[in-house]
Image (cartoon, rainbow, N blue to C red):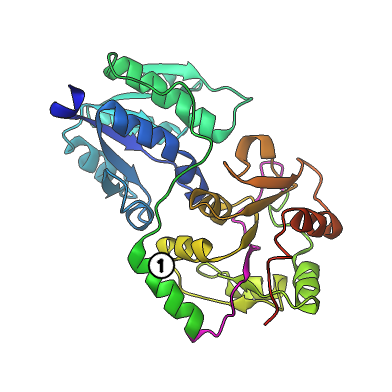
Amino acid sequence: MRAMLAKTPLIVRLPNWVGDVIMTLPSLQALHNAGFDLQLFGQKWIVDLLHNFPAKLFQVPNSLFAARTAISNNPARNALLFTNNVSSALIARLSGKQPIGYMNTIRSCLLTNKIKKPSYLHEVEYFWKIAQLATSTWLPDATWPHSIPNTINLPIDIVCELKIVEKLKQEAIATPFIVLCPSAVGTAKNGIPKIWPYWSNLSETLHQQGIVHVVCPGPFEEERCRQLTPKAQFITGLNLSELAALFGQTDFVLANDSGPMHLAAAVGAPVLGIFGATDPKRTFPWGGHYIGEFGKWPSINEVLKHMDNDGAKNSIKSI
């Protein structure tokens, strides 16, 4: 019966980081299935990343005034905030919307409905919990799934897939190969860099073993990535959809706790996340594997052993 009814418009303010947006996907799919017409507001790259998702996509303007205008012009009355900052709640209120989000001391008075932020959940579960509250508030008769899917499903764009096949030929990259993602933006809350300290040693070891490994640096990352992985083959200039397509072609992805790690897991690539600066219990790749723990990086031998156990290295041929 609900499929015959017009869907209810709902503004969703997405997080500002690629990995966080990917971890909202199970919640976004459940919201769509519940009967919401999703109006997704976020950074400009969501138009690339989510262009195949059943939702309307909008870039949030940088200025508060422009953001208020953009959101106030949207037909949705209600807004679900996956962000934790005060500004997103303030903009929603100034736009005449009714926002739901996690409470904190400052912004709680701006929220129509709210719950305390739990400290023990994975980010996928964290987003799921607030999305469930939004559904029970605004669509109380809607069906909500009993559990979160075990994996995240982000379809690979066929045009990007064909482009990557051609790109691999142009760059003379032999298959099979693995992808290394040595970059990670920023530092953890304790100030520790999120980059595993042994990427250079790993690249040298893989090269000695004849294992083809590819690195795809983001904007302004190429020089640093060449230092971190001196023996890697490089593919530059990929957007997020193309990077996802590359992950779909590889036999294995090894990454820091980063957006590419979550992207690889979302397209079903075998992925191993390396942790040491952040807590893997909160951000491990959903549906993938991880190694390391908060405050303690794994050694290169531990990573190589894990790759052996996964069969990753055995499936890779030399150039």
Looking at the rendering, the stretch of residues picked out in magenta corresponds to 170-191
Residue at the (25%, 28%) spot, across then down: 35
- Image location of residue 5, percent across then percent down: 14, 26
State left or right for residue 166 relative to residue 141: right
Instruction: Name the amino acid type tagged 1.
Output: Glu
Specify the principal SS of the magenta part: loop
> Quadrant location of residue 122?
top right
Q: Split into 4 quadrants, where in the image is the C terminus?
A: bottom right
Residue 178 vs 84, above or below: the answer is below
Q: Residue at x 33, y 30 (%)?
A: 31
Whether residue 107 can be seen here: no
The residue that appears at 47% across and 45% down in the rendered structure is 22
Q: Nearer the viewer, residue 207 or 104?
A: 207
Q: Quadrant of residue 260?
A: bottom right
Residue 152 position within the rendered picture, expressed as x and y whole percent measured from the top left? 48, 42
Q: Is residue 319 above or below residue 281?
A: below
7 vs 290, left or right, is left
Q: Residues within 10 Å of mark 1 (few under 14, many from 20)?
A: many
Residue linked to disc 1: 161
Magenta region includes residue 182: yes
Asked whether residue 158 is drawn in magenta, I would say no
Residue 204 in percent (x, y) is at 79, 75
Q: Position of residue 146 (x, y in %)?
A: 45, 21
Label 1: element kind: helix
Q: How many marks?
A: 1
Q: Is residue 314 above or below residue 191?
A: below
Q: Is residue 71 left or right of residue 153?
A: left
